[in-house]
Amino acid sequence: MGLGQDSGITTFMSVELRPHHLLCLLTYLGKGYTPAFVENYERVVTRLNAGETITIVSGPDEICHPMLNDPSCHCRNESVAIRDQQALAAVLTCLRLEAITEPFVLAQDDVLRLRRAFQNGDLRAACQGCEWELLCSRIAKNDFRGCRLQPPPKE
Ligand code: SF4
């Protein structure tokens, strides 16, 4: 688990993510809905690339945060909650885990395995109906070139 300094007080840090964002992070190229959304997304990816842990949450997470006051925000929709359930099931299968109950580090090997599964379609049930489905397929076909999530290897 990562440690952080804030005004001299040591705090525990972990990136809070809803499950389907574990997929979206695989294809994130540095583009998104608004400049504030992208700025925030970059901060999240930088933390993950530094090896910070992930805590799985249900409902809106740290990536959703800049969109929550937008009238077009879909982050609280039931369809997105279903997307989360589908994504979590696929990620657990891919990473050969029974459950994720504690903060965990998504290491380089995990991302490689998830990207391979994303390319061969095993992770894509959650993507059905997403407006970015074709774009993400193209990014996967292009071997995730330029994607920002590049965490370090396991220690
Ligand atoms: S298709 Fe949609 S849900 Fe799937 S990874 Fe891309 S942005 Fe995320």
Image (cartoon, rainbow, N blue to C red):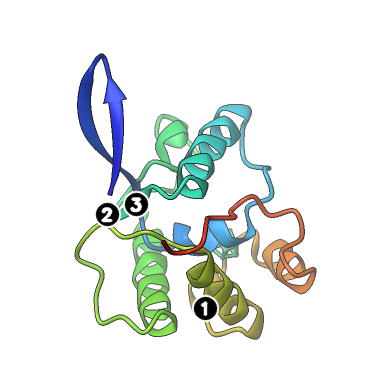
Q: Dot 1: within a 10 Å radius of its alpha carbon, few (fewer than 14), some, or many (20 or more) residues?
A: many
In the rendered image, the residue lying farthest to the right is 142
Residue hosting label 3:
53
> What amino acid does circle 2 point to?
Val
Rendering quarter of residue 128: bottom right
Please tell me in which quarter of the rendered image ligand 1 is found.
Answer: bottom right
Q: Which of marks 3 and 1 is in front?
A: 3
Residue hosting label 1:
123
x 75%, y 53%: residue: 146
What mark, if any, has residue 48 been given in the picture? none
> What amino acid does circle 1 point to?
Leu
Q: Label 3 vs label 2: CA separation?
A: 13 Å
How far from the left and from the top, in percent, is residue 3? Answer: 28, 38
The answer to whether residue 155 is left or right of residue 1 is right
Q: Is residue 117 above or below residue 109?
A: below
Q: Dot 2: within a 10 Å radius of its alpha carbon, few (fewer than 14), some, or many (20 or more) residues?
A: some
Residue hosting label 2:
57
Q: Dot 3: within a 10 Å radius of its alpha carbon, few (fewer than 14), some, or many (20 or more) residues?
A: many
> What amino acid does circle 3 point to?
Thr
x 63%, y 52%: residue: 28
